[in-house]
Image (cartoon, grey):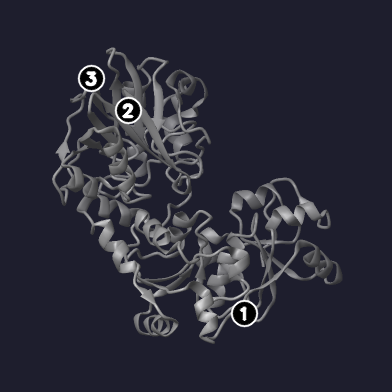
Amino acid sequence: MILEQIYTGCLAQGAYYIASNREAVIVDPLREIQPYLDRLEKDKVKLKYIFETHFHADFVSGHIDLANATGATIVFGPTAMPLGFDAHIAIDGEIFKVGDIEFKVLHTPGHTLESSCYLLKDNNGKESAIFTGDTLFIGDVGRPDLAQKVTADLNQDKLARYLYHSLRTKIIPLADDIIVYPAHGAGSACGKNMSKETSDTLGNQKKVNYALQEMSEDEFVEKVLDGLMPPPGYFPQNVMMNIQGYDPIQKVISNGMVALTPEEFEVKANETGAVILDTRAPQVFIEGFVPNSIFVGIDGSFAVWVGTLIPDIKQEILVVADPGREEEVITRLARVGYDHAIGHLAGGFDSWKKANKEIDYISSVSADEFAKREAEDASIKILDVRKQSENYSEHIIGAVNAPLDYINESMKQVDKDKTYYVHCAGGYRSVIFASILKARGYDNLINVAGGFSAIKASGKFKISDYMCPSTML
């Protein structure tokens, strides 16, 4: 038997490839399916099933394209939702044989109504692993607020109570030596306290995971709902794509890979209302970019920030990328449902410069220069665009917290006529923030290179190291 976790860091997502005696199953595949097809060909095995643990919200699954390419059967747990494609809807306890191994479906509603786990019995007949999707993470459980309002009487309290019973009747009774393989790790918005580890024994989780400890149903509901932040706006749109279907990814890539000259790019931008998305490194972007571009660097938490900051997945997008990385950008957009890239700037930003097109900039200073200016004028305005929790933990005394996560609210604190120094943790989010406000006519934002890490390392600022909200404007 082969069991491999295929982990994608930018989404904090784990897919799984399991093969036995010339047959295979893939659990929760990503949308780009070629790596799976290559692996099947390498191992000379036939894909028999595609197991989906639930209707994913944070990414578009590859189940449809993978089924079309291989003839494998898509399997979901019990659900009343009508699907836009052929699939097998399993019943609780149903057994699926794959080579010399078998999987048992455990219906575990709570994160969503259809959420299910797949319990693996190896070729020795031993229950050895469980693929828990978003029901059970390492150190956490799936948030129960994402599927509320699917039906009129469904809410997060009811889902949390479902989850309480699912964990206690289906998961906790299993053997301690079973390995837990979840769909996500630290960094995913599908939970709130996930470990950086991506697997663990169930026995250890019974000891350390707060949600598996002995407590009343009401206590569990209170704990699991405490501290939940609003999910990114693209989540429900991804859910519907996973339920109803989507265009083949090769079609999406083909549309986005249209190479546009600077002149063609400019015309498209003016005629379509497309968002110009610049995906280069932040330190490169600030030195020159196509006017009205939004920066989200491909080497950061790209998909998450695109999904957070571009509310409509049907928004047309024009891509500016480092030459050779255009297809990577378009593929990663498609992972989270942004299928409407309509072209990219041929030759990258250098071609725009060579065509003598208008160029915009964002001012940036080092932490030392920032300290010098702050020493000369203690009244300068500082925007900390990190998450509220980061700001509460440590911040420059006098800084205003304006989280990038909620930029439409945060920008209400900014006066177009005043100058602000903007920082995040390391210099990625601050450039995103500054680029968005720049595109909206805010011309007086200065980025602090290196962010809070560089600021703190300079030793030249008064830092609050206790949980106290920073100043509001």
Identity of the amino acid at label 1? Answer: Asp
Q: Is residue 435 above or below residue 119?
A: below
Q: Which residue is mark 2?
A: 166
As drawn, the label of residue 366 is: none
Q: Nearer the viewer, mark 3 or mark 2?
A: 3
Q: Is residue 403 above or below residue 341?
A: above
In this view of the protein, which residue sits in the foreground, 265 or 161? 265
Q: Nearer the viewer, mark 3 or mark 1?
A: 3
Q: Which residue is mark 3?
A: 100
Residue contact at pointers 3 and 2, CB within 8 angstroms: no
- In primary-sequence order, the first of circles 3 and 2 is 3
Q: Residue at x 21, y 54 (%)?
A: 245
- In primary-sequence order, the first of circles 3 and 1 is 3
Task: Label 2: state its secondary structure.
Answer: helix
Q: Residue at x 74, y 61 (%)?
A: 398
Q: Nearer the viewer, mark 2 or mark 1?
A: 1
**Label 3 to label 2, Cα distance in Å?**
28 Å
Q: Residue at x 31, y 13 (%)?
A: 126
Task: Label 3: state its secondary structure.
Answer: loop
Task: Label 1: state its secondary structure.
Answer: loop
Let me know if residue 115 appears in the view: no
In screen coordinates, is 218 left or right of 391?
left
For the C terminus, the quadrant is bottom right
- In primary-sequence order, the first of circles 2 and 1 is 2
Q: Which residue is mark 1?
A: 443
